[in-house]
Image: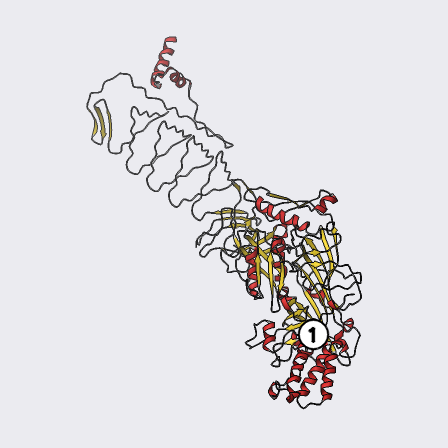
Amino acid sequence: MFTDANTTHFTLFVDGLKKDQNANKPVDELNKKSNFSKPTGIVSNNNNSESDSLNAGLADSLSELTSSVTSGLSGIGSSLMGGLGGLTKSASSLDPFTTLQQANELKASLGTLSNKNNNSEEQDKPKSAVDRLQILSINGYEGISTLYAFEVVLVNEHIRFDITSLLSKPVFIAFTPDGKNGDGIHGVVNAVKRGSIGQHYATFSIVVTPRFTNLMRRTNQRKFVDKTTPEIIKVILEEHGMMEGAEGGYKTQFKETYPARDFCVQYDESDYKFVSRLCEEEGIAYSFRHSATNHTMVFTDANPYFPTVADAVKFMSDSGLVADSKVLKYFDVALATRPQNVSWRDYNFQTMKQPEGNSEGKLSEKANEAQEPKLEFYDYPSSGMDKARNEQLAKVQIERLRADHLVGEGYSDRSDFHAGYFITIEDHPDIETMDAKKPWLITHIRHKAYQPQVLEAFGSASSAQSTMPSQLSKFLDTDIELEFPVENQQQGYFNVFTAIPQEITFRPKHRHPKPQVLGSQTAVVTGAAGEEIYCDEYGRVKAQFHWDREGTMDENSSHWIRVASNWAHDGYGTVVIPRVGMEVKVDFLEGDPDNPIITGAIHNGVNKVPYDLPANKTRSVFKTSSSKGGVGSNELRIEDKAGQEQIFVQSQKDFDQLTKNNHTVQVNNNSHLQVNNEHSETIKGNRYQHQLAEEHHLTTLDRKTQVMMNDYKTVGISEHETIGTIKTVQAGMEIHLKSGLQTVIDGGLSLTLKAGGQHIVLNPAGIWMTMPVWTGGVPMEGTPSIPLPPLVKGNSVAATQSPPVILAQRQALLKGQPRCEICEKLAAERASQGNA
């Protein structure tokens, strides 16, 4: 059991100054201004106008009392001096509260006898209920990258004291009577509770936590675009009044440079869990620095930034010997098997590669001696889009996994030990084997203090706190695994702690996993002002989620979000870009709120379907809208209503079709083509047309036809041609007209035949010729008509054939000579006469 070195009294300073010029001054300065210093064992409320006497400690009260007696006891009997001397002599044997109470009563009785206090306005006034609060016990916990919480049990003679007056007040729990050098814990009263009520006193408990605890009570859903982790933390903390670099705020000490996160979502998380999670992902630790007036949160990513406790702690085993100073009573180390290698990979869609990072853990000498097995930690995805980022994350992960493979455990009464501080150990008997000679970083520490003498002032020696259930676990987000080696309550201050050696980098554990999005969500596509379609080179778009209260429905609503397609490959696939204002369906890869992907679009009460439903429920429609600001659309509509089946295609402007090989169209009924302007058709090869029934052709204006080579036409029966005014036919060499029975040329009023410079004219006046008529002669044979029949292509019916060519005509064609049917007839007659 510890001796006098451990019977220190503990002090609670309450800072609640309002409308007071001293509001931001240190406690020591306020104490000096009030003609006292070093308050002990009593709560001071700086918000009370009577504060000149509220923080007077036992030693100072006796000193002031002695001074008053020296200057103002003239005329007082020796018995009073004897009484005063007896009080002073016995002061050391009384508990602080009783001694102080009796001293103040005696001081008040002196009243006008003291030259110092002969003014009635300067006489001490009765103490308030707050001033009579005394600390009975302290139970607290600290850890790197976690909240600290201290439960303080208080005793007060005013059983009706309103403990709620302390709620939300900044306080400093001093582990020494004067609270010098910040040897204690500063925080905010987060909870108050009334405990047991005795005959002369009542107990109360308060829980003191950092300002950072307020972040546990605000839950949010928000996003950060292109922000680094330190930038995101800055936004969150400053919203809670914790300013960077300010007293009572926070500061950063970073060795690494952190990349911007494309899209970082706080998804249904408290601000505390969100900030803690980001720190854990990056390997950033945070701890707290305390002073008598404030506490500061410090973020760091490297061991050298952790401070060191000023004085080395001496080791002295708990053997019952009296220690002249506060010492380390117990220290031992423990080893545990941990992975030695980390591999982490992700997928980069821009390169279609899986960048991978690897890192090996640093082995201590102890680990080398233990011959750890080769164990690997492999995980996917890592959120690293390149190898360098994955290497960084793998390094952080292996340091995290191995941060507790070598852990020291200690037990001491050093009240200046805090989480996030290095300590050095002296005089350890096994200093080499235990690696005790190196600095050790305290990672977790549990504090406990007890001063039962405050109960003696009320005539009680029982433990008042035994009937008060602890509230501590409600304010910690981690299980308290540290246990004191002695279960019975001891007077004084003690702590138990865990620590890691200096060469092992501390990394916070993954205690706050990223929330997962269960299922899909919908969002609204956004873009820059004036844009209807806003995308990047990959067809990604921006969108604002319905839970986003801070978004402004513009290009800053999100990062670029990938859009899924039915089919996608190198240079081919389907591309349909969601447009600004569309409601889209969003899934999340691996359930990660930071990794959304758009998988569809959804109609709603504002963006309605193209055709009224359910009236047109049999229609399947793909309809676009002209952009920008267009009123038209392209459309593909499929109607499946029985008896009215239809495929409708609309092109708002041009319709271009390319067939690189055959193009076959079959219409089983009617086909209609209407061209409201020009129609042009170019065929580089042959054209075949098979008309099985009639063909009707109407040209309202001119028709111009040019055949660059031969023109063949066959009419099966008759051909009728009507020309309204004039018909001209011109042949470069020959025109041959022939009929099987007769040829009729009707000139109407006049018929003219011209050849060889001569002519014949037939008109109503007669027949006129330029030459006399001669008998005999041989008629000229014209080139016979030999039209070629059209070829029939495809599955159409064959074209109607022309009448067969007779044998004589075929022979003439073979000889290349003209054929005359009259000559053939005369020759046949002569042949018959000769035979006769």
Residue 34, x across and y down, in percent:
60, 78
Q: Quadrant of the C terminus?
A: top left
Q: In front here: 599 or 820?
A: 599
Q: Is residue 245 visible?
A: yes
Q: Is residue 759 left or right of residue 294?
A: left
Q: Which amino acid is tagged 1?
A: Gly
Residue 139, x across and y down, in percent:
72, 67
Which residue is at 73% across, 82% downward? Answer: 87
Residue 301, x across and y down, in percent:
60, 54
In the picture shown, does residue 148 fall above or below 387? below
Residue 455 falls in image quadrant: bottom right
Q: In front here: 180 or 232?
A: 180
Residue at the left extreme?
770
Which residue is at 37% across, 8% downward? Answer: 834
In the picture shown, does residue 68 fall above or below 166? below
Which residue is at 33% across, 36% downward? Answer: 704
In the picture shown, does residue 505 fall above or below 463? above
Residue at the top extreme?
835
Q: In front here: 697 or 52?
A: 52
Q: Is residue 120 left or right of residue 770?
A: right
In the picture shown, does residue 66 fall above or below 364? below
Q: Is residue 546 visible?
A: no
Q: Which residue is mark 1?
A: 41
Q: Quadrant of the N terminus?
A: bottom right
